[in-house]
Image: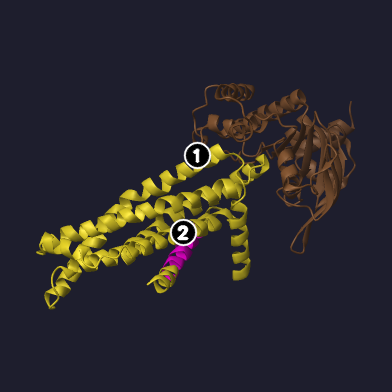
Chain colours: A yellow, B brown
Amino acid sequence: MNFLNHLGRYMFMLRDMTARPDNWRMYLLEVFRQMNSIGVGSLIIIGIISFFVGAVTAIQFAYQLEASFLPPYILGFIIRDSVIIELAPTISGLLLAGKVGSNISGELGSMRITEQIDALEIMGINSRNYLLSPKIIASLLIVPPLILIAAFLGIWGGYLAATNYGISPAMYEKGLSYMFKPYNVFIMQVKSVVFAFLITSVSCYQGYFVEGGAIDIGKASTRAVVFSSILIILFDYIITLLLT
Amino acid sequence: MIEVQNITKSFDDKQILKGISTIFSPGIINMVIGTSGSGKTVFMKCLVGLFQPDTGSILYNGIDFTRISIKEKKQIRTQIGMLFQGSALFDSMTVEENVLFPLDMFTNMTAKEKMNRVNFCLERVNLVGANKKYPGEISGGMMKRVGIARSIVLNPRYLFCDEPNSGLDPQTSLLIDQLIKEITAEYQMTTIMNTHDMNSVIGVGGKIIFLHKGNKEWEGTNKEILTSDNQILNDFIFASEFLKEIRRGATNPK
């Protein structure tokens, strides 16, 4: 199937998801269940990785700064902006593409193969609306705060690593507040929302339209992760280009 | 009653259904039989609306299911129960939640009323005490019974069963057949069953249609099938020596 066919089917999927839910209570329960699965389920891994990404970045820059004439507080400034603008949203996005994307695609693929989606359709339920849109809405609601936490932990990891490396806490803190632009946090949140949509919608598409058996579910999960990751990097570039 | 009028269905250039017409009556099990690839599953998927036939009509009590709006289709679908070959239970839900799900979606019953209905349906399929188990924790036969309970929880007028006996031992198969037969007669449902199981066909088949290469090759009752002189049907039905012996007994009674 060529690219345009996939694109058309993807757009139709998005259109069908926006239908009025068959039962609002059940729909909202599903949104909360997905928020728990996507958000709470990813918090620990995002937290650990963001913390160490911040820490490693701090040590590497501190090492580079040793040989320069730049003041030491610049380290806090570099860590803050690189974590907020790039590292937190992109690393978390790629991580979520792997964890959440493969999970969504595998779950939906398995439901398709075992005829659970057909069962919903025969009951008269719009399966795209009931199964897919709660996942997308939940991720749009939960990923931005998740990435905010990732940014905080990344900066904190940088702080601990930098002070351990010999930079004084006061210097790091001075760097953190130096030329701070709240607009950068806005860029981070725009990236969060776009990445959340890309990860879940692409994974939903790959899982929902699986045909075949167990091997095809595995292939769909791989495609979900690969395509989401590529799109994250592509849109990271586009958003950065447009907003900075 | 479901009336099928000359339906055809093709995928790419391959015609799967070649103009099938028949009538399925309520209160009996209507069986669709045929070799693998004969079009049984596509036929059933057309009947329940998962596939749109290329031509022809499917009338649910006189309403043409192929030509009504999505909203009207939804209305008819709430009157349809379906038992899938693999049961198609929601594996993230317990037995109780699976049966409760259609009630949660489509009724305004109170929690107590819903639970009473769920327990009634589980009792009806002899599944008392399995409420809190997950599909992964129960046997294939139990899964089929949960599937039946979920199919009948909204009191459907139409019940579709896609190879309900596949993967089950002969004794459990008989129990499932008997259960479907009893429920069909009790609620006067229009039941349509796809099957390969000749025990089911001869045991509980009220009306049987035989599909061959996308055509309706033969139609009759479970008594008539034993004495039919349709060669293609006989090659399919009496494939084993054991069944050939039954046929000899049926055509030459002592």
Q: Residue at x 81, y 31 (%)?
A: B26
Please tell me the numbered disc located at residue A199: 2
Report how many numbered discs are placed on residues in the image. 2
Q: Residue at x 59, y 48 (%)?
A: A129
* Chain ID of residue with mark 2: A
Mark 2 / mark 1, whichever is N-terminal: 1
Q: Is residue A233 magenta?
A: yes
Q: Is residue A86 above or below residue B101?
A: below
Residue B226 x, y percent position in the rendering? 85, 35
Please rate how many residues cluster around mark 1, counting C-alpha atoms within 10 Å: few if below 14, some from 14 to 19, many from 20. Answer: few
Span of residues in magenta: A219-234
Q: The residue under label 1 is which amino acid type?
A: Leu
**Most common SS among magenta residues:** helix
Q: Is residue A60 magenta?
A: no
Residue that carries the numbered disc 1 in the rendered image: A29
Between B80 and B196, the one nearer to me in the picture: B80
Q: Residue at x 63, y 64 (%)?
A: A8
Q: Quadrant of residue A148?
A: bottom left
Left/right of residue A37 with respect to residue A175 in the rendered view: right
Q: Is residue A37 above or below residue B199?
A: below
Residue A10 x, y percent position in the rendering? 59, 61
